[in-house]
């Protein structure tokens, strides 16, 4: 299981799928979600299989989430900030015309 390092860091609050959860200043959205016990970040468009972070360095795109209304953001590359809203993604994205 994913664990945070023991040293203290300022705590802030983010909202994931409507639930408030603690995060540490300077950590990635993926790290905060994993530390809170969330492993499913998105579902694949074709099979609906659950996906979560694999590489934690922006290569695999398995950690895509919607951050503050912007879909397709890589959670492993986004740094948390107070009041951030994150939504897990499900299935294929809708095209807006």
Image: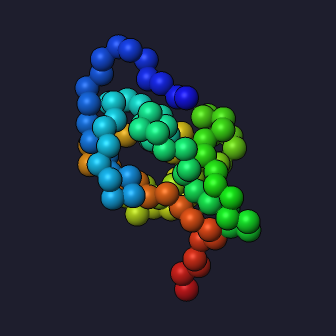
Q: Relative to 10, is 63 above or below? A: below
The quarter holding residue 87 reads: bottom left
Please tell me which residue is depicted at 52% across the width and 28% down the height of the picture. 2
Residue 80 drawn at (x, y percent): 37, 40
Please tell me which residue is depicted at 38% across the width and 14% down the height of the picture. 6
| Colour basis | rainbow
Please tell me which residue is depicted at 25% across the width and 26% down the height of the picture. 10
Q: Residue furthest top?
A: 7
The quarter holding residue 43 reads: bottom right
Q: Relative to 2, is 79 above or below? A: below
Q: Is residue 26 visible?
A: yes
Residue 59 drawn at (x, y percent): 68, 40
How many marks the image carries: the answer is 0
The quarter holding residue 95 reads: bottom right
Question: Going by the image, does 65 lie left or right of 53?
Answer: left
Residue 31 drawn at (x, y percent): 47, 34
Residue 24 drawn at (x, y percent): 33, 30
Q: Is residue 77 visible?
A: no
The image quadrant where one finds the N terminus is: top right
The image quadrant where one finds the C terminus is: bottom right
Q: Residue furthest bottom?
A: 97
Question: Going by the image, does 23 lie left or right of 67?
Answer: left
């Amino acid at each position: 299981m994913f664990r945070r390092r023991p040293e203290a860091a300022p705590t802030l609050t983010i909202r994931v799928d409507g639930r408030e959860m603690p995060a540490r200043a300077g950590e990635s959205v993926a790290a905060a979600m994993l530390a809170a016990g969330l492993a499913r970040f998105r579902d694949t468009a074709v099979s609906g299989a659950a996906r979560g972070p694999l590489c934690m360095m922006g290569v695999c795109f398995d950690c895509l989430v919607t951050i503050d209304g912007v879909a397709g953001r890589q959670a492993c590359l986004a740094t948390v900030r107070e009041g951030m809203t994150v939504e897990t993604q499900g299935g294929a994205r809708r095209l807006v015309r």
